[in-house]
Image (cartoon, rainbow, N blue to C red):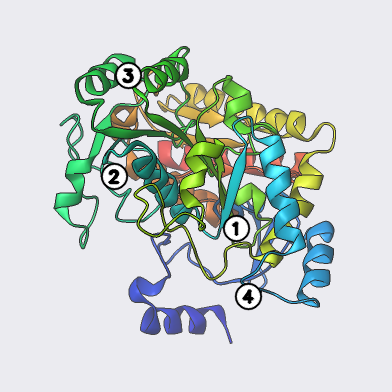
Amino acid sequence: MSQKELLTKADRFFVGGGNGEFRLPPEANFVASHGKGSKIFDVDGREYIDFLLGSGPMILGHCHPAVIEAVTRQIQKGTTFMALNEPSIQLGERIVEAAPCGEKIRLVITGSEAAMFAIRAARAFTGRSKYLRFEGGWHGVSDTTLHGARTLNPGEYPDTTADGGGIPESWSQDVLAVPFNDVERARQVIESRHNEIAAIVVEPLQRCILPQPGFFEALRSLADQHGIVLIFDEIVTGFRLAWGGAQERWGTIPDLATYGKTTSGGYPMAAICGRADVMDTMNGWRHADDPKRIIASGTFNAYPVGAVAGLATMDELAKPGIYDRLYEMGNRITREISAMGEELSIPLLVGGEGPVLQVLFTEDTEIVDYMSMFRADKEKAYRFGVELIKRGCFVTPYEKIYLSTVHSDEDIDRLLESAREALKSMAD
């Protein structure tokens, strides 16, 4: 069936013509057929260099031989058991030993579940109901977390509103938000309401915003002072910015961390990992009426296929020079696209860190919080992303660029050539 026919069929049967928030305009839309290494191909045979990587999980690229071998071997033994299995135990051990905060772990399937269960555990452990988040951070799509993530009217701190329809507005009263990197606002909210706050939840790299010096140290100190659970959402940063994730990169250890993407090898898998006493709220041997016992279960928890894919991925990431290479590519892209903006008199910034980047079109000289991103020109960023796709570089318009271990210098050359052409077309 041709791509045009498949896209027509998708429009007919899928809501909005797709399966989620990701969507492309007609001139850039396509149907993926297969992937190999750093490339994906549409059903009409066109090649794209993949800088979306499934929104991050394909850090080894597509069809990595080690992952294929591990998964093939496992599916011949069975795909799921609803029971302990050797691959999940090995993956759990590997993550706990690598995570600076690691003591105990619970394997789940999605990042949304991991964030939801981590917050639930903090509430049960502390006996408090509210949590403090940072405006514009992303912690999945549960009703628990979609407050203050995509606000269209930033600035009403610390109050939040639901980020979409169908989410009870009453739930927003238990979600407080302040700007990322704003230590003083965070301190004011925590000191005035600490008896109500169960957790501080933060993306260490908030979308593409780097933490300022002292920010995490202040959060750690405030959490310790007031008995609050500090949660790092490392779904994106875990095993990507460093072997020890953002905790290693910036030197602050939370009480809990959530993991996904790089620990899944392209298969569904996520985890909550951290302090044994907080994690023990998930202990199924606790009495059913124990207020410190939470339900953190799921049919596919400890999914062995995802576990072997994750183990194979982590084996590759543990090899010498991997992170140096990821940062080398990211630093080159940042440096050269920034120079293009200056040369073409297009105000832009490249945010992010190492293998996670985002091009923002803005007059601001620094991106420090959600308001900084909110002021950026989203229409220009979207046009830039679409132009890259039309030139054979697959990205999410107005979202992150992900890098993999298999991207070559030639792939980066082609991205930079396409970026220059796209920027020139926008400047004309």
Q: Amino acid at mark 1?
A: Met
Give how far apart the Cα atoms at labels 4 and 1 are: 31 Å
| Depth check, front residue: 94 or 332 | 94
Disc 2 target residue: 150
- Say whether residue 385 is visible: yes
Q: Amino acid at mark 2?
A: Arg
Disc 3 target residue: 182
Mark whose residue sits in front, 4 or 1:
1
Image spot of residue 263 (x, y percent): 66, 50
Quarter occupied by residue 237: top right
Give how far apart the Cα atoms at labels 2 and 1 are: 25 Å
Comes first in the chain, label 1 or label 3: 3
Comes first in the chain, label 3 or label 4: 4
Tell me the crowding category of disc 2: few under 14, some 14 to 19, or many 20 or more residues within 10 angstroms, Cα based: some
Give how far apart the Cα atoms at labels 4 and 2 are: 36 Å
Image spot of residue 243 (x, y percent): 70, 34
Q: Give the residue at the far bottom of this rendering.
A: 1
Whether residue 134 is situated above or below residue 299 in the rendered picture: above
Q: Amino acid at mark 3?
A: Asp
Task: Give the SS element for disc 3.
Answer: loop
Residue at 48 percent across and 12 percent down: it is 213
- Residue 44 is labelled as 4
Image spot of residue 160 (x, y percent): 19, 40
Contact (Cβ within 8 Å) of mark 3 with mark 4? no
Mark whose residue sits in front, 4 or 2:
2
Quarter occupied by residue 99: top right
Disc 1 target residue: 269
Residue at 58 percent across and 87 percent down: it is 1
Q: Amino acid at mark 4?
A: Asp
Residue at 54 percent across and 49 percent down: it is 388
